[in-house]
Each structure stands twice: as structure tokens, then as C-alpha cells.
């Protein structure tokens, strides 16, 4: 999908640096000068080795961390200005790896109500939003259950519902599927994609699973605190062996297609999924 | 020869309370000496509960678990199992507590009553096994390490006990692809070099396919299948029904079979898949011969 996105920037990151423990013996550079834009309505995947700065960058997107130097603006609001804090946090919602750390209430429904109640919304509006968020995440039937008795996948869906109910412009997910089994992973990924396509929610997905990154519109590869590569999944995964320099690997089908081509097989360019590979082998 | 025997194991959490949940029901399985076994199943299938029976941390509600000839119900003998069965929990790095990496890894051997020199030797060896440089890391605080390094330090702490059986619960969750491959490669080496029996609890089917000799599948607290890795992945429908995935190479074989290729044994690794496709090409792509695209 090609469109002119230049007028469509939701989050602008400019010369952003972040230093952990500045001035101390264990000082460490988290980000070294990141400049990039996140477009409204896109599905962006951020991949990179452990310690490459992915999570640090994510935490700058809703002012959980503040720039050492440079700036981050969300819809024109500067994250370093105190008066914008709550507005930014409402617009950019975060979901982390371990859902147990972000569930707060004794019942599923109460957990989702928590955010909008604190916004001081009218009860009818709260009800409408909560119903909608529960429906989106497929949790209606579990609304009177206790969160700690849910499965891992259900808990993670509840964590997303708790963010969604705030009607954010952007959803930032930091390895949301790391603790989920394959069907939980697939389910959550499908829902996130649908939220992006049908509701226009901007999605920033941080992940170690290359198959998840393949589903995005655009990918950033982080390396040593900077964005090393940017492009569509096809552009990125055509880099082949260059990815190894970033501690990444090709998705299985892309890797095999590459090897088969080296052995002289004719296959179409840009194979990323197993279905595309089978089609290439049996056209 | 079996090193662990699980016989009709049933385990109930919170028995005789309103929160009673049966987590394992009537599970019988075995672990063979020196093998690399994967225990797989969807979330909530009882994998972690089963794993905690292997060193006597949990004891059967009904049935029995025998580890290295010791019935885990026998509290006195089972107490010594911690030295023989190393258990690495999910996110083990949250249990790092030492001021330095050395202190943390030395904790286990110190408690086995080993002398100073022996402790030192074991720490060095454990660090070598997980490829953490002894001189570079020994005096660092565990908090100064990267996620992958911290995970490996935590695992080294268990290896330093020199267990005969190593149980790892989702050891690669949250690691990048290179870190994942590296860690599992190191674990495979333990099996090869020290005849250590490895039990890997995972829902990552790619990892299971690539590294395990055998697989035990659980579903909803019951034993679903057990068998050689290739046999398990040769029957895709059985896995898909319980919400598990096939590893990519087996998925490819599954789809190619659907497209009319006749393939006898499924592939478990990309190398095997590559060999299989090249063999088909050399045979002139028999099933795709109607298509001129591959002439």
C-alpha cells in the first residue's frame, strides 16, 4: 500500500539519545542519535538483538523515559514537557512482555474500567467503551472472571483491552507474545493487525519473532542504539546474510528460498512465507 | 534405560479448597538416560507442573515419580535430588541475587560442601559452558549484564552443581534469534560432552524440532503423545488440533505433500528441507512435471 505519508506523521523522533546511569561507572548508551518518523495508521515492527535499544526506544514513545538529548513529539506534543504527559500517555498506550505486571483489578471487567474511570468520563460512555474493548479482544464471556485465573494468552488480551479502552492513537507492544503458546500468539497477532486495518490504530510492535515482523508494513532494525536499516519486510529480508551482523536471522522460508536459489533453483524474488515458497516450487 | 519414570501421575493444586484445580491427570511417561527430551504443549497443559515433579519440588497427589531410582514421595531421599536434578525456571535471571556473577554461580557448589578450589573449578567450568568469559564477568554485578548474558549466568548457577539431569522451562523466552540458537547449542553440547540428560519445556516447536531426540506432548493436563521427534512432526493434524504449530520445515513438507509431492519422512531442519527439495529437483520435480516453469 503506497501512500504519501509525509503529512501523516504521528510520532516524530529527532536526534534522540538516552544514557543509562550517566556519570557512573556502569554508564551505558541506550540510544545514540535516533531520527525517524512513525506514520499514522501504520503497522511498524521493530526488531534487533537483545540490548540494541528497542525497549528503550519504545519507552520514549509515551514519555516513560525522557530524552537525554533530542526530542520526541506525539502529534506535535513534546514528551519532555510536563503539561503534555497525560495527554501523551492517553494517545500512546503500552503493553509489555509479562501481562501479570500490568493487571490491577479483581475482575476482568474492573481491570478494563480502571483507565476510563480515572479520566472522569460519564458512566454511559465508560460502559460503551468497556463493552467495545472487551468485544475487540474476545473477552466478553470472561468479564466476570478473576484475571489471575486466565491463561497467558487471555491475560495478554486483557492487558491490550485495558489500553484499548483509552482509545489511543497508537499501541506500542513490547514483545507481547514472548510468553504465549503458538495459538495464543497467532490470535493476538491477528487481533492487532485487525485493530490497525479496521480501526486505524497505529501499531508499533517490538519482537524477536521474524514471522511476526513479516506481517508489518514497515520494519526498523535496531543495532547498538540506532536504527541500522529501515524498509518493508520484503526489502529488509532480501538483505539475506547482512542480517546476521545484527544477530538476526531470516524467517525460515526466506532462508530456504535463498539457499535454493544459490543451488540454481529458479524462484520468484521476495519469498517470506511458507505458502509463497510452496507456490514458487509448485506454480 | 529410563532415568525418570512417571507412573499414573495426578496432581491437584489447592486440594480440598475452593480453588482446587487438577493440573495433571493420569500421566505416565519416561525420560531416557542421556536423551534430549522436549516437553511441549499449549499454555495451561501442565508442562511446568510436570517439570517441577522431576526434582521433587512438587510431589504427586496420586501416582508416582521415580527419579534416579528415588521415589519422590520419600521425603528423606528426595531431599538430595536438588544436587542431581538442576531445574532452571522461566526467566531464571530474576533469581540472580549475588553481588557478583561469581558469587551467584558459586552459591550451589558452596552448598554442596565443596572446597574452595573445587568451587572455583566448577564456577569456571560452568561459565565456560555458557560462554561467559571468566575474567571479564566474574566481578561484575549481575545487573550490569545484558538480558542474554544474565540468562546464561543464571543457567551457569545450575550447571555448577553438575547435575545429571537438567530441566529447563522455556529457557529462550525473550532472547533474540542468535541468543536462542547459541543457548540451545550450548545445552546440546552438555548432553553430548557430559551425558547430561536434558529436559526442555517449551512451546516453541522450531526449537523442539531442531534439538530434541524425543517429544512428550501434553494437552489439558493429560499425556497426548510421546515419541521420536520426527514421528511426532510427521502427523501435523495431531498437533494442529491442540493448538500447537509445526516447525517451518515440517509445515513445508505438509504443504508440498498436499500439492502432490510424495515425501516419505518429514523434515525437521532447514538443512533437511533443502536436501529434500534439491533431491526432488534432481528427479525432475515429478509431481510438478505438468508445469513448464521448472523445466
Image: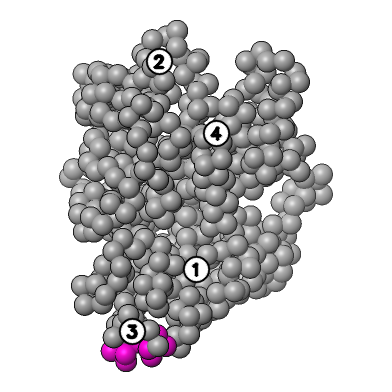
Report whether B82 appears left or right of A47: right
Q: CA distance from mark 3 to mark 2?
A: 59 Å
Q: Nearer the viewer, mark 1 or mark 3?
A: 3
**Could you say whether the residue bearing mark 3 is in a helix, strand or loop?**
helix
The span picked out in magenta is B282-289
Which mark, by number, is residue B246?
A: 1
Viewer-side residue, B290 vs B199: B290
The residue that label 2 is drawn on is A77
Q: Which class describes the residues within 10 Å of circle 3: few (<14), some (14-19), or many (20+)?
A: few
Could you tell me if the residues under marks 3 and 4 are in contact, i.e. CB atoms within 8 Å?
no
Q: Nearer the viewer, mark 2 or mark 1?
A: 2
Q: Nearer the viewer, mark 2 or mark 4?
A: 2
Q: How is the image coloured?
A: one colour
Chain bearing mark 3: B
Query: Quarter of the image containing the C terminus of chain B?
Result: bottom left
Q: Is residue B283 magenta?
A: yes
Q: Which class describes the residues within 10 Å of circle 4: few (<14), some (14-19), or many (20+)?
A: few
Could you tell me if the residues under marks 2 and 1 are in contact, i.e. CB atoms within 8 Å?
no
Q: Quadrant of residue A267?
A: bottom left
**Could you say whether the residue bearing mark 1 is in a helix, strand or loop?**
loop
Q: CA distance from mark 3 to mark 4?
A: 57 Å
Which mark, by number, is residue A101?
A: 4
The residue that label 3 is drawn on is B292
Q: Is residue A281 visible?
A: yes
Residue A59 x, y percent position in the rendering:
40, 28
Chain bearing mark 4: A
Q: CA distance from mark 1 to mark 4?
A: 31 Å
**Could you say whether the residue bearing mark 4 is in a helix, strand or loop?**
helix
Q: CA distance from mark 2 to mark 4?
A: 28 Å
Earlier-in-chain disc, 1 versus 3: 1
Amino acid at each position: 500500500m503506497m501512500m504519501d505519508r509525509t503529512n501523516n506523521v504521528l510520532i516524530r523522533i529527532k536526534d534522540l539519545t538516552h544514557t543509562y546511569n550517566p556519570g557512573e561507572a556502569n554508564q551505558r548508551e541506550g540510544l545514540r542519535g535516533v531520527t525517524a518518523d512513525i506514520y499514522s495508521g501504520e503497522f511498524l515492527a521493530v526488531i534487533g538483538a537483545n540490548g540494541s535499544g528497542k525497549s528503550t526506544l519504545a519507552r520514549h514513545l509515551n514519555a516513560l523515559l525522557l530524552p537525554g538529548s533530542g526530542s520526541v513529539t506525539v502529534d506535535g506534543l513534546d514528551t519532555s514537557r510536563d503539561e503534555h504527559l497525560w495527554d501523551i500517555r492517553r494517545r500512546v498506550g503500552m503493553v509489555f512482555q509479562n501481562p501479570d505486571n500490568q493487571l490491577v483489578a479483581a475482575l476482568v471487567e474492573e481491570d478494563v474500567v480502571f483507565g476510563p474511570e480515572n479520566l472522569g468520563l460519564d458512566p454511559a460512555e465508560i460502559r460503551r467503551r468497556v463493552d467495545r474493548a472487551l468485544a475487540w479482544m474476545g473477552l466478553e464471556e470472561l468479564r466476570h472472571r478473576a484475571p489471575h485465573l486466565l491463561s497467558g494468552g487471555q491475560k495478554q488480551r486483557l492487558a491490550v483491552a485495558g489500553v484499548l479502552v483509552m482509545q489511543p492513537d497508537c499501541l506500542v507492544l513490547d514483545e507481547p507474545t514472548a510468553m504465549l503458546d503458538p495459538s495464543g500468539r497467532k490470535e493476538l497477532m491477528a487481533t492487532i493487525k485487525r485493530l490497525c486495518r479496521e480501526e486505524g490504530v497505529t501499531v508499533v510492535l517490538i519482537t524477536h519473532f521474524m514471522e511476526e515482523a513479516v506481517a508489518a508494513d514497515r520494519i526498523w532494525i535496531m543495532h547498538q542504539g540506532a536504527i541500522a536499516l529501515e524498509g518493508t519486510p520484503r526489502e529488509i529480508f532480501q538483505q539475506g546474510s547482512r542480517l546476521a551482523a545484527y544477530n538476526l536471522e531470516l524467517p525460515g522460508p526466506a532462508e530456504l528460498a535463498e539457499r535454493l536459489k544459490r543451488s540454481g533453483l529458479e524462484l520468484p524474488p521476495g519469498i517470506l512465507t511458507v505458502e509463497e515458497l510452496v507456490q514458487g516450487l509448485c506454480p | 534405560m529410563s532415568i525418570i519414570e512417571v507412573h499414573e501421575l495426578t496432581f491437584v493444586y489447592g486440594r480440598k479448597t475452593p480453588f482446587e484445580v487438577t493440573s495433571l491427570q493420569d500421566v505416565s511417561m519416561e525420560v531416557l538416560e542421556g536423551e534430549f527430551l522436549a516437553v511441549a504443549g499449549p499454555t495451561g497443559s501442565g508442562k511446568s507442573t510436570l517439570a517441577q515433579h522431576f526434582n521433587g519440588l512438587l510431589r504427586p497427589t496420586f501416582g508416582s515419580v521415580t527419579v534416579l531410582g528415588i521415589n519422590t514421595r520419600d521425603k528423606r531421599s528426595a531431599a538430595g535430588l536438588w544436587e542431581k536434578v538442576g531445574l532452571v525456571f522461566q526467566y531464571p535471571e530474576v533469581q540472580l541475587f549475588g553481588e557478583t556473577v561469581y558469587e551467584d554461580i558459586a552459591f550451589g557448589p558452596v552448598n554442596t560442601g565443596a572446597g574452595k578450589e573445587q568451587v572455583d573449578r566448577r564456577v569456571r567450568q560452568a561459565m565456560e559452558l555458557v560462554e561467559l568469559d571468566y575474567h571479564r564477568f566474574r566481578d561484575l554485578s549481575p545487573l550490569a549484564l545484558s538480558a542474554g548474558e544474565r540468562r546464561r549466568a543464571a543457567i551457569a548457577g545450575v550447571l555448577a552443581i553438575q547435575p545429571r539431569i537438567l530441566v529447563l522451562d522455556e529457557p529462550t523466552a525473550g532472547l533474540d534469534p542468535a541468543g536462542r540458537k547459541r543457548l540451545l547449542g550450548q545445552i546440546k553440547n552438555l548432553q553430548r560432552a557430559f551425558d547430561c540428560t536434558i529436559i526442555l519445556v517449551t512451546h516453541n516447536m522450531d526449537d523442539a524440532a531442531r534439538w530434541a531426540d524425543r517429544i512428550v506432548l501434553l494437552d489439558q493436563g493429560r499425556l497426548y503423545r510421546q515419541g521420536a521427534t520426527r514421528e511426532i512432526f510427521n502427523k501435523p493434524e495431531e498437533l494442529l488440533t491442540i493448538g500447537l504449530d509445526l516447525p517451518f520445515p515440517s509445515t513445508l513438507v505438509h504443504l508440498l505433500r498436499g500439492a502432490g509431492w510424495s515425501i516419505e519422512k518429514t523434515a525437521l531442519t532447514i538443512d533437511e528441507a533443502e536436501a529434500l527439495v534439491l533431491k526432488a529437483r534432481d528427479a525432475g520435480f515429478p509431481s510438478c512435471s505438468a508445469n513448464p516453469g521448472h523445466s
